[in-house]
Amino acid sequence: MATHHASPAEIVDLETWAQDMPNEQTKVIVKTDEMELARLVILAGKEFPTHKVSGPIIVHCINGKIEFTAMGEIQVLMPGQLLHLMPDEQHSVKAVEDSVVLLTIIFKA
């Protein structure tokens, strides 16, 4: 079955999506040639090891608590907080608590 991606102007309720965290499902919300918007579920103690993305990213903590490591610094993001990185910046993400994160990637033209 194909993954549903939100259509332009379609309302996406992130609070509702955060409630299915026990299912541990990452979902791509929107995917176009220019960007990708994904809801990541990261269970406590799990980590996305150091990596980089070719475009700028925005990481927005919806639920839980994550440690975000980039530019030689570890920062803790709580619900409602976000940060961004420029292209090709090495980073890693670790869940301190079961967490839901909204990830936006902007692709280079």
Image (cartoon, helix red, strand yellow):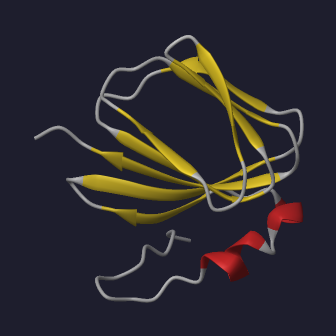
Which residue is outermost to the bottom? 10
Provide residue 3's location: percent of width, then percent of height. 51, 69
- Taking the spot 88% from the left edge, 46% from the top edge, the residue there is 97
Residue 27 in the image, given as x and y percentages of width and height: 59, 61
Quarter of the rendering containing residue 66 = top right
Which quadrant would the N terminus be assigned to in this image? bottom right
Seen in the image, is 94 located left or right of residue 4? right
Q: Does residue 32 appear to the left or right of 18 in the view shown? A: left
Q: Residue lying furthest top in this view?
A: 72
Is residue 33 found left or right of 68 in the rendered image? left
Q: Which of the 4 image quadrants contains residue 14?
A: bottom right
Q: Quadrant of the C terminus?
A: top left
Instruction: Report the number of discs.
Output: 0
The residue depicted at 69 percent of the width and 78 percent of the height is 15
Q: Residue at x 45, y 89 (%)?
A: 11
Q: Is residue 90 above or below residue 14?
A: above
Residue depicted at x 43% and y 73%: 5
Instruction: Depth check: give the residue in front, 76 or 45.
Output: 76
Residue 69, image quadrant: top right
